[in-house]
Amino acid sequence: MDFENVLTLIQKELRDAFRNRWFLLYAIAFAALSLALAWFSVSGAGSFGVAGFGRTTAGLINLILLIVPLMGLTLGAMSLAGEREKGTLIYLLAQPISGAELLLGKFVGLALALTAALVIGFGLTGVFMVIKGGGGDFRVFLTLLILSVLLAVASLSLGFLISAAVKRAATAVGLALFLWLVLVYFGDLGLMGTAVVVGLKVEQLLTLALINPLQVFKLAAVFDLRQNLEVLGPAGIYAFRTYGGALWPMLVGLLLAWVVLPFLLATWVFKKRGVI
């Protein structure tokens, strides 16, 4: 593998991402909503007695669950399918590069673009909190940024898999939006409704949560914020009592698996399907 080719493709993807209107819209919306949450956290200090990074972090978790997977899924879905539909994918592969170099360069470039958008959003929020004298544990805020990047790249990997399997960009984006709705629905409300209707046991409820990257992120974020999962109900209490100190590395490992496995599967699908 020629890493000079990969680096060139990474630079191309970064430029394309920051010219993408939808990506810029998502990034600006995330930064604006993050700042709004920070402002409410500071302004509510007198009423609730707490403010700062801890309260802002708690508010950001639900915002991240909605916006960040949508950013990653749609950006990944448009990557290969968009190039294939425009015919530029054939042009790229006509150059002295391999398919593996193309996929790795595009994926890393888009992952860096997502990371940059999140760092800017979190950075502006952090600076605002410091200027306004917000207290709390900055480490928790920084950990949430790292978990958000993992969730974004995991979502990108799933979008990449969709993009490798379909021909048209519109179809890929439609499937990505559908998957986003499914993942969001099978969050707390969906799992709660399923548990009531089907009569799931607590260990089955936890298993359903662990196969959803959004819920894995939420479990990890809440655990880091509170050092327990009682706020998430029986499934959270069961997870904490069952895994104890191993819970945090297990959750991070699951997020990493959601990054690597869909990308590897996308590589296999791309090789089987071909360029057209």
Image (spheres, rainbow, N blue to C red):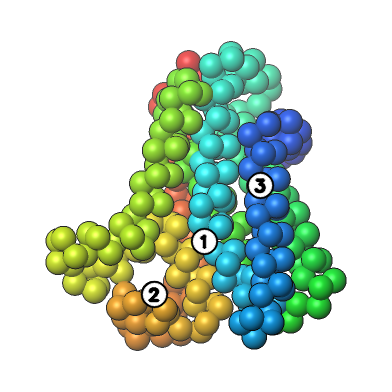
Instruction: Estimate the spatial distance between the alpha carbons at disc 3 and disc 1, rounded to whole Å.
Output: 14 Å
Residue type highlighted by circle 1: Asn
Which residue is denoted by mark 1 in the rendering? 62
Task: Specify few, some or many for label 3: CA neighbours under 10 Å numbering under 14, 14-19, or 20 or more.
Answer: some
Which residue is denoted by mark 3 in the rendering? 29
Q: Position of residue 223 (x, y in %)?
A: 49, 77
Residue type highlighted by circle 3: Ala
44 or 128, which is in the foreground?
Answer: 44
Residue 139 position by quadrant: bottom right
Q: Position of residue 210 (x, y in %)?
A: 36, 63
81 or 53, which is in the foreground?
Answer: 53
Label 3: state its secondary structure: helix
Task: Specify few, some or many for label 2: CA neighbours under 10 Å numbering under 14, 14-19, or 20 or more.
Answer: some
Looking at the image, residue 206 sits to the left or right of residue 62; the answer is left
Instruction: Estimate the spatial distance between the alpha carbons at disc 3 and disc 2, rounded to whole Å.
Output: 27 Å
Point out the tag, 3 or 1, that comes first from the N-terminus. 3
Residue 124 position by quadrant: bottom right
